[in-house]
Amino acid sequence: MTDQTPALRLEGIVKTFPGVRALDNVSFSVLPGEVHALMGENGAGKSTLMKVLGGIYQPDEGQIVVSEQPTVMTSPLQAKSKGIVFIHQELSLAEELTVAENIYLGELPKKAFGLVDWQKLYAQTNVILEKLKVGFDAKTRVGDLSIANQQMVEIARALTVEAKAVIFDEPTASLTDAEKVVLFDVISDLQAHGVGIIYISHRMEEIFKITDRISVLRDGQYRGTLKTAETNEDEVTQLMIGRKLDLSRNETHHDLGAVALEVRDLSCGKLFRNISFEVRKGEVVGFYGLVGAGRTEIAETLFGLREPTGGDILLNGEKVHVSSPADAIEKGISLVPEDRKGQGLVLGMNCRDNMTLPQVSDLKAGPFVAEGAEIAIFDQYRDRLDIRTPGWKQLVGNLSGGNQQKIVIGKWLSMHPDVLIVDEPTRGIDVGSKSEIHNLIRELASQGYAVIVISSEMPEVLRVSDRIVAMYSGEIIRTFTSQEVTEDNLIQAISGINPEKAA
């Protein structure tokens, strides 16, 4: 960071929507070769600020300055032409097109008479893919790639232009640990070429690993900038939410009830094998492991989305066969899915309709849905889960990530399940809302629910779980109580090492 002239500056940005001042005199800058974190709770104004930068929104006041030149951004395409490149958390790929076509969409190399120069296109693309060390090539259809690899295609788009600043929005949310290493190498290479990086993430360990400075927004206002090497998680968290958080491990103790769910030697082809565990009423059992360990596939099998190839499922002591999600719901199993926006919510519908969707056929008064009954359910769970929304008419897509997750949880709690499965409960959620979701999970257990939590975050499973099931390559390696688990023995277990068996 020898050049102290910012690659990009936003000065005094104000943006108001009907009834909401989303940004209030916000200033932000990134230096060439710097990784600058932009942090804040969901709803703090980060996305709005980036949409102003990208030309999606026009600011009411303030200006954007690129390489010391005041600029009016009118569209994302213009932003890219100015060297401002976005890597979005939400994938925006055309699945039917190839990797090459997606990366150069709108900028395909041409030959005479406007024909696409396919040879040049594939050659340029493969050069970029080699830098990213991915296992697919330019001609691969994007729809055939995993979510993690589709994210790498998004990242590849940033390498096609002479960028002045690249904005990464939660770039590791879908990446494996190995892919994260490649991403951080790419960011380091961009730094070395003098590109400024704006890094938006809720993952503190990443922020403290790769960033130079941290700027914080809260309630649409700029709250300060800290040098990463001179601060700590507690200081950043307090700046973000204005209060201290309880980040201690789970040490709650209460009497557990009868076994609500028992799984015996459950298998599903090559996805997982001979899985056995139980969950009691009032207990939280956490599932922890690397990507591909089989955790989500177990949840999908319990919820009737996959057909097991062997083993038994017992609910309240009785053997059952779960043939579909509708069957699972009827038997008392609910699943809060990993992808809340794609699988858990209808973003264009209001809060009430999302929450009552699974039981709408039971809320009819004659041929019509009983609106009063729907509103009563929404009001009950809005109060119970402290969902922050102006009212039931608010579109779910306009809520923060934490409140969206509470809507999904409320939807399934309103079905009164015996077993609640929550897959990645706080993915893409800010640190303050994470704490609320963790407290909610513990509260549900204290009310007698049998809860399964699947998480890729060690602090999360340590905080909420009474027992932790460590998985590796489709098998349970070891089950820990909250008293005996340590970070070291948990890491060993998810790496395929079981000291108990080795002894």
Image (spheres, rainbow, N blue to C red):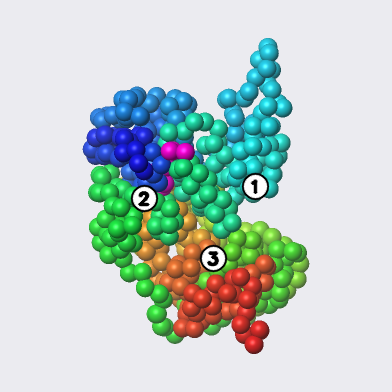
Q: Nearer the viewer, mark 2 or mark 1?
A: 2
Residue 417 is at least partly visible in this image: no
Viewer-closest of 492 and 364? 492
The residue singled out by tag 2 in the image is: 212
Mark 2 vs 3, N-terminal side: 2
The residue singled out by tag 1 in the image is: 134
Mark 1 vs 3, N-terminal side: 1
User: Image point 59% across, 50% down: which residue?
Assistant: 148
Residue 60 is at least partly visible in this image: yes
Asked which quadrant contains residue 94, the reply is: top right
Q: Nearer the viewer, mark 1 or mark 3?
A: 1
| Dot 3 alpha-carbon crowd within 10 angstroms: few under 14, some 14 to 19, many 20 or more | many
Contact? badges 2 and 3 (CB < 8 Å): no
Q: Which amino acid, mark 1?
A: Val
- Residue sitting farthest toward the front: 2
Residue 194 part of the magenta segment: yes
Alpha-carbon span between mark 2 and mark 3:
32 Å
SS type, badge 1: loop
Q: Which amino acid, mark 3?
A: Ile
SS type, badge 2: loop
Q: Which amino acid, mark 2?
A: Asp
Alpha-carbon span between mark 1 and mark 3:
27 Å
Q: Position of residue 408 (x, y in %)?
A: 47, 56
